[in-house]
Amino acid sequence: MSDHSGLPSVRWSLRGLTDEGDEAWLIRGISRKLYRCPGCHGEIEIGAEHTIVQYVRRLGGTEHHHWHRRCAEELLIPELGKVKRIPAGESSQGKLEARGRRKSGQRRR
Ligand SMILES: [Zn+2]
């Protein structure tokens, strides 16, 4: 088992860094429509618990994808650096989009 205590849940999200230095936030979600998982190209059924991966780009901007929980765990999380648990309230869509609007370097400490 890894040391970041598992997958995103109702209470916890995960945040890691990509090779490019972008933030990748992993958030628990319930699908409201059919999604296709970028990991296995399979479908994620409506109503399924899955992992939303929201990227916050180093140079600004956000982008998200929907992954099967297991695919995210096996394929995505191992690629990320510095994976940490973050309280889920910090990973709301609005907060992450606000982060993406600020360029790095203008961020307050
Ligand atoms: Zn998948």
Image: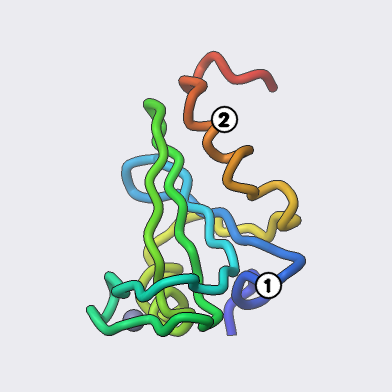
The residue at the point 60 percent across, 75 percent down is 7
Q: Is residue 70 above or below residue 64?
A: below
Q: Position of residue 72 (x, y in %)?
A: 42, 74
* Mark 2 neighbour class, 10 Å CA radius: few under 14, some 14 to 19, many 20 or more: some
Instruction: Tell me if 16 is positioned left or right of 18 in this view.
Output: right
Q: Quadrant of ligand 1?
A: bottom left
- Which is more toward the observer, 22 or 51? 51
Where on the picture, by quarter, is residue 76? Answer: bottom left
The residue at the point 55 percent across, 31 percent down is 99
Residue identified by numbered label 1? 9
Q: Is residue 108 above or below residue 96?
A: above
Q: Position of residue 98 (x, y in %)?
A: 57, 30
Q: CA distance from mark 1 to mark 2?
A: 22 Å
The residue at the point 41 percent across, 72 percent down is 33
Q: Quadrant of the C terminus?
A: top right
Q: Position of residue 100 (x, y in %)?
A: 48, 31
Q: How is the image coloured?
A: rainbow
**Which numbered dot is residue 96?**
none
Q: Quadrant of the N terminus?
A: bottom right
What secondary structure is found at the residue carrying circle 1? loop
Q: Is residue 78 above or below residue 15?
A: below
The residue at the point 55 percent across, 14 percent down is 106
Q: Is residue 7 above or below residue 100?
A: below
Q: Is mark 1 within 8 Å of ligand 1?
A: no
Type of residue at label 2?
Answer: Ala
What secondary structure is found at the residue carrying circle 2? helix
Where on the picture, by quarter, is residue 8? Answer: bottom right
Q: Position of residue 93 (x, y in %)?
A: 58, 46
Instruction: Tell me if 100 is positioned left or right of 43 in this view.
Output: right
Residue identified by numbered label 2? 98
Q: Work out whether mark 1 precedes mark 2 in sequence or the reverse, and give the earlier one.
A: 1
